[in-house]
Amino acid sequence: MDQEATQHRSRRLMVFVPLLLFLVLAALFLSQLLSGRDSAEIPSALIGQPAPKTNLAPLEGMALPGLDSRTFAGNVTLVNVWASWCAPCREEHPVLLQLSRDKRFAIAGMNYKDTPENAQRFLSGLGNPYSTVGVDGSGRAAIEWGVYGVPETFLVGKDGKIRFKHVGPLTEQAVATSLMPEIEKALDAR
């Protein structure tokens, strides 16, 4: 009888263990949802670090220099990683064109794993916000920059260090609330 009672308790416990595990996981997921953190925001280990040494060839057919990180010194530069095959890159393009009107900083493009023909067609059709465009056909430079996917935008300060990173397409709201305040700080830095 004692052994039978123990088995009965074990079976009851086995019924409640999965339920208890489910409740713990549900509470964990709910706390993450309600935390207020932006799940799209991916921290970058490069913030505060010098921008990776980059020297990419220019995009053929465009009268622009390639992307050379040596030009960052003394300037505030946005480095935008994009591709013609990237739908979100098309979404953010009008925002980049608007940003390019502000001559206090430069916008450099890193064309990621694209064909020169498609990249040229993209910029010719939608407009060119970039002062330089470097071709990263292999994706190696993007890896060195810590790129997770396109589009991504980095803010490089006058000291050549990465000050801010935006993952995903830039929107007017993201520019107003996140990017422009960081640009203003970078412009004011000595």
Image (cartoon, grey):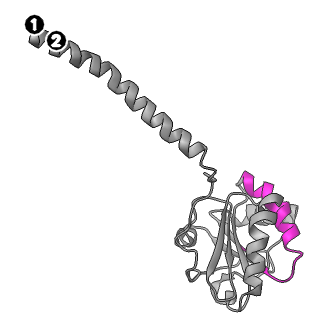
Residue 88: x, y in percent? 73, 53
Q: Is residue 58 above or below residue 92?
A: below
Left or right, 23 with respect to 51, comes to: left
Residue under numbered circle 1? 1
Q: Where residue 67 sits in the image (x, y, percent)?
A: 68, 80
Marks 2 and 1, how far apart in space?
6 Å
- Could you tell me which residue is drawn at 74 percent across and 58 percent down? 89
Q: Which residue is drawn at the image coordinates 54% and 43% (left, top)?
A: 31
Depth check, front residue: 74 or 129: 74
Q: Looking at the image, which residue is at 84% across and 71% down?
A: 99
Q: Is residue 138 above or below residue 84?
A: below
Q: Is residue 117 left or right of residue 56?
A: right
In this view, 101 is above or below 24: below
| Residue at the disc numbered 2 | 5
Q: Can residue 152 be seen here?
A: yes
Residue farthest to the top? 1
Residue 99, magenta (yes or no): yes
The answer to which quarter of the image holds residue 161 is bottom right
Marks 2,1: beta carbons within 8 A: yes
Q: Which residues are magenta?
A: 87-109
- Report x, y in % for residue 170: 76, 60
Comparing 166 with 65, the one in front is 166
